[in-house]
Image (cartoon, grey):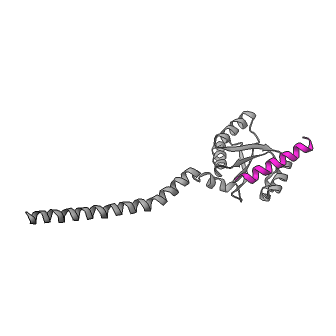
C-alpha cells in the first residue's frame, strides 16, 4: 500500500475511533471468507461497522485517537467492530456469533472510553438496547404523573359524588 493510502487509512480509522461510542477487537483466526462475510452481515444488521485492520495502521490510529489502552491487544489477526448507534451492539453480535463459531475470539474493547477485557463482554452484551432503556426511562418518568392523574381523578369523583348526594338531600327536603 503506498504511503498516501496508508496515511488516509490511518486518518479514516482514527475518525471512526473518535466517532464510535464503543470499539471491540476480535481475533478471526480460523474463520474462512464465508464466515467473515456472514459475520459482517450480522454486524451490519446491528448497525455496526466491522473491519479487518493491519496492526501497524491500527496502532497508529489508536494512538492518534487517544485509545492507547488497545495497543497491547493489536497482535495477530485483528478486526475492529465500531459501535456508534448502540454501544453494546458489537458485544451482542460477538457473543452470539462466537456461540456458533468458536473461532471468533474477543480480544479487548473500549466501551464509552473504558477498557474492557474478555471477562466483561458478557456483561456488556446483556445490557438492554438504547430503545429499551429510553422506553424504561419514559415509563419511569410517566408513572408519577399517571399516579397523580389517577389520584386527582379519584378526588374529583369523590367530590362529585358528595355534591350529588347533597343535591339529592336538598331536593328531598324541599319536596
Residue at the limit of the structure toward the left, as seen here: 175
Quadrant assignment, res 111: bottom right
Give the dominant element type of the magenta stretch: helix, strand or loop: helix
Q: Which residues are magenta?
A: 1-20
Against 105, residue 148 (above or below) is below
Against 24, residue 29 (above or below) is above
Is 150 displayed left or right of 107 in the figure? left
Residue at the limit of the structure toward the top, as seen here: 34
Q: Position of residue 125 (x, y in %)?
A: 62, 51
Against 1, residue 63 (above or below) is below
Q: Residue at x 73, y 52 (%)?
A: 19
Q: Position of residue 63 (x, y in %)?
A: 83, 56
Is 77 displayed left or right of 94 in the figure? right
Against 141, residue 56 (above or below) is above
Quadrant assignment, res 29: top right
Q: Position of residue 156 (x, y in %)?
A: 30, 63
Q: Residue at x 88, y 47 (%)?
A: 7
Q: Residue at x 22, y 64 (%)?
A: 163
**Total number of numbered discs in the rendering:** 0
Who is closer to the viewer here, 164 or 174?
Answer: 174
Who is closer to the viewer here, 104 or 25?
Answer: 25
Residue at the limit of the structure toward the right, as seen here: 3
Q: Position of residue 11 (x, y in %)?
A: 83, 49
Quadrant holding the C terminus? bottom left
Amino acid at each position: 500500500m503506498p504511503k498516501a493510502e496508508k496515511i488516509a487509512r490511518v486518518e479514516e480509522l482514527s475518525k471512526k475511533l473518535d466517532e464510535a461510542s464503543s470499539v471491540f477487537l476480535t481475533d478471526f483466526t480460523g474463520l474462512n471468507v464465508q464466515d467473515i462475510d456472514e459475520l459482517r452481515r450480522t454486524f451490519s444488521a446491528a448497525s455496526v461497522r466491522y473491519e479487518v485492520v493491519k496492526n501497524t495502521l491500527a496502532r497508529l490510529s489508536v494512538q492518534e485517537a487517544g485509545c492507547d489502552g488497545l495497543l497491547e491487544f493489536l497482535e495477530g489477526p485483528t478486526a475492529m467492530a465500531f459501535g456508534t448507534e448502540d454501544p453494546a451492539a458489537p458485544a451482542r453480535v460477538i457473543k452470539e456469533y462466537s456461540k456458533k463459531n468458536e473461532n471468533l475470539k474477543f480480544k479487548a474493547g473500549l466501551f464509552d472510553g473504558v477498557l474492557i477485557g474478555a471477562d466483561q463482554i458478557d456483561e456488556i452484551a446483556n445490557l438492554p438496547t438504547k430503545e429499551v432503556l429510553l422506553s424504561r426511562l419514559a415509563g419511569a418518568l410517566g408513572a408519577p404523573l399517571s399516579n397523580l392523574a389517577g389520584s386527582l381523578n379519584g378526588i374529583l369523583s369523590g367530590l362529585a359524588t358528595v355534591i350529588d348526594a347533597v343535591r339529592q338531600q336538598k331536593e328531598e327536603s324541599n319536596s
